[in-house]
Amino acid sequence: MQDLVIVWKNDGSHLYEQIYEHIKEEIRKGKLLYREKLPSTRSLAVYLQVSRSTVELAYEQLLSEGYIESVPYRGYYVARVEELYRIQEEGEREAAAQETKEKGFAADFSPNAVDMRFFPFGIWRRLTRAILSQDNVSAFSLGQAKGDRQLRDTIARYLHASRGVNCSPDQLIIGAGNDFLLMLLCRLLDGDGTVAFENPTYPKAYRIFRLFSGRAVTVPSDEGGIRVGSLEAAGAKAVYVMPSHQYPSGRIMPIGRRLELLSWAMEGEGRYVIEDDYDSEFRYRGKPVPSLQASDTAGKVIYIGTFSKSIAPAIRVSYMVLPKKLLRRYEKQFASFSSTVSRIDQAVLDAFIREGAFERHLNRMRKVYKEKHDRLLEELRPLTKDFRISGENAGLHVLLTDRRGRGEEELVRRAREAGVRVYGISEAMVEPGEAKGGPATVLLGFGGLTKEEISGGIALLKEAWKN
């Protein structure tokens, strides 16, 4: 533990902000290292000749952002921030993908892109104007920590009708994106053991649990999904899955594996299944697959979903359904927290769903994406001699697995040289070493492209990969 020498700035900023910025920069520059102990709030306040509450405010901000962690009866320590930088780098990669498209790429097959050309701007504008014109003072207050009751009631009804989810509005937590809800869940599950993930998986979720709980591990999976028998050996108390459309494989978990997973959760005290219902709205063949939560009769499934894919990424409204036991823990620990979603945005979204505009928009986008999905498969047909296609009939991307022994890096490089961006599956491998030795697989997203761009992009890939 060392004292912190801070050069005070006379720029009008609060002292706690200067303490916060100084410690954050020391951590980011590597001058304060992982697990290094910080001075206590009392001793630092005495050393800097400021009030103890000033130091406490700075530490609370650092805690909330994950730069430091508090160990009961021991003090404050520098947290593992390498994972935070990796999360930030993912956002930078997404921005780079958009930038490369603007710089002349004929097609960017990003698996994260959506088509905003069909967004109902007029309806959204009208609803926003109507809510703001009501002079409703309460809309500008903080509101309930879980989110507005009316929106939670609307989402609960929608989830039951569309995904078979059984919950009361009280069990729903509204948050600004899945990342926030996962960080909240890290705290709710704190002390309850290891969280298991498939590999590959949604990288941000894995890194959030590594960063905020430090107890995330990968376990083997097969064509049916995560191998339930491996959870015991890993000492897992929770498992993160996407049973309706696993990212990035596109795999749908069969009913036998789902029941096996629920049985595992029911056999142990404090075990939970975290169900991320990724891309569940977009299915192009067969009947909709009910959520895993719909089969849960013991309160073992934590259900998470978002409107980012179905409406727009900037909406930043996600939801989490907590089993009643975890709900009581949430209400005890976080009842005083403020909602992270603006009440105006909540009111607009509620009206958008209630008046049927969301259902109409969703039906339209299903048709739009199905046409793109079918065009992509049609254009890929000549490549089936060299590639195996998988992950089709749902979601916004498909996978191509090379049959000729070429490496992922070579396929991505050749595509780039031809003016096309494709994405290797290794980007979703949270334990990169496990990617070695298998056939190369690339992801082709179609959500953000026109049908003409899909055809043109695949034509260039055929030429780039023909030898």
Image (cartoon, rainbow, N blue to C red):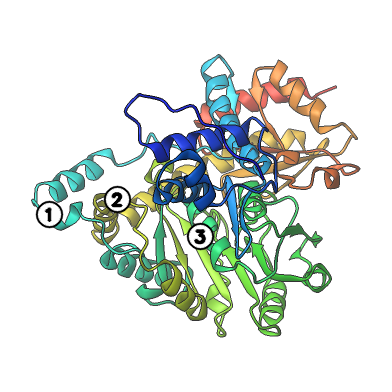
Determine whether 231 is above or below 207 in the image: below
Viewer-proximal residue among 441 and 365 = 441
* Residue 342: mark: 2
Which of the numbered marks, if any, corresponds to residue 184? 3
**Which residue is rendered at x = 20% and y = 45% of the image?**
128
- Identify the amino acid type marked 1: Val
Q: Is residue 89 visible?
A: no
Q: Earlier in the sequence, mark 3 or mark 1?
A: 1
> Residue at the location (69% across, 40% down)?
33
Location of mark 1 (residue): 137
Element under label 2? Answer: loop
Tell which of 384 and 146 is nearer to you: 146
Residue 284 locus on image (x, y percent): 55, 54
Distance, label 2 to label 1, CA atoms, is 13 Å
Mark 3 or 2: the one toward you: 3
Residues 96 and 44: in front is 44
Residue 204: tell me if it is visible.
Answer: yes
Amino acid at dot 2: Ser
Tag 3: amino acid: Leu
